[in-house]
Image (cartoon, rainbow, N blue to C red):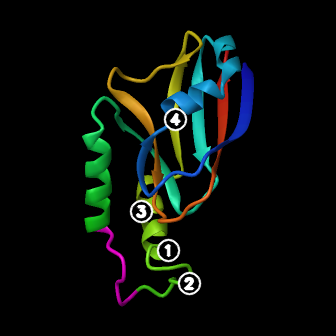
């Protein structure tokens, strides 16, 4: 059993959902040493999240953003955590709903995603900075 771990930074993105599959793969050159295993991708932030979904049609990314903004609106009178702006608390709620990590099988030295699947960075802040990811791969 081998273990590979790498931490890297994804450059700042605008608010919304962004496909980062290519960026993740380009930061994992040692994945080719794993024939069979599992990769966990973790984001080290509380106002952004990760998910896996449709990566062939960019309108999906737009629809995700629209839906989450409707589901978790800004400027609610019951929010107390608003020190960093009206997007602050909604960003934390959205990040909790989507989660801070995803797991993907590794097969033949590659992420074993479905035909239409991709990894999304879900940026929930209006003015976010760079985001740090940690990828841990276990396998043989």
Q: CA distance from mark 3 to mark 1?
A: 10 Å
Q: Which numbered circle lies on residue 94?
A: 3
Q: Which numbered circle lies on residue 83?
A: 2
Q: Please tell me which residue lies in front, 61 or 37.
A: 61
Closer to the chain start, of discs 1 and 2, is 2
What is the quadrant of the C terminus in the image?
top right
Give percent across and percent down for residue 81: 52, 83
Q: Which residue is mark 1?
A: 88
Residue 3, placed above or below residue 16: above
Q: Nearer the viewer, mark 3 or mark 1?
A: 1
Q: Is residue 76 left or right of residue 31?
A: left
Tell me whether the residue at label 4 lies in contact with that at label 1, contact meaning CB atoms closer than 8 angstroms.
no
Mark 4: secondary structure: strand
Q: Residue at point 27% right, 58% down?
A: 66
Q: Which numbered circle lies on residue 103?
A: 4
Tell me whether the residue at label 1 lies in contact with that at label 2, contact meaning CB atoms closer than 8 angstroms.
yes
Tell me whether the residue at label 3 lies in contact with that at label 4, contact meaning CB atoms closer than 8 angstroms.
no
Q: Residue at point 66% right, 29% down?
A: 27
Tell me whether the residue at label 3 lies in contact with that at label 1, contact meaning CB atoms closer than 8 angstroms.
no
Q: Quadrant of residue 70?
A: bottom left
Residue 30, placed above or below residue 9: above
Q: CA distance from mark 3 to mark 4?
A: 19 Å
């Amino acid at each position: 059993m081998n273990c590979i771990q790498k931490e890297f930074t994804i450059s700042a993105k605008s608010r919304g959902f962004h496909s980062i599959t290519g960026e993740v793969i380009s930061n994992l050159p040692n994945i080719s040493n794993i024939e069979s295993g599992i990769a966990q991708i973790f984001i080290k932030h509380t106002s952004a999240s990760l998910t896996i979904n449709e990566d062939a049609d960019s309108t999906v990314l737009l629809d995700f953003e629209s839906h989450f903004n409707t589901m978790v609106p800004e400027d609610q009178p019951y929010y107390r955590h608003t020190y960093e702006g009206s997007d602050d608390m909604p960003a934390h709620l959205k990040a909790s709903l989507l989660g801070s990590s995803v797991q993907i099988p590794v097969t033949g030295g590659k992420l074993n995603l479905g035909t239409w699947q991709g990894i999304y960075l879900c940026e929930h802040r209006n003015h976010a900075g760079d985001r740090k990811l940690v990828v841990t791969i276990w396998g043989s």
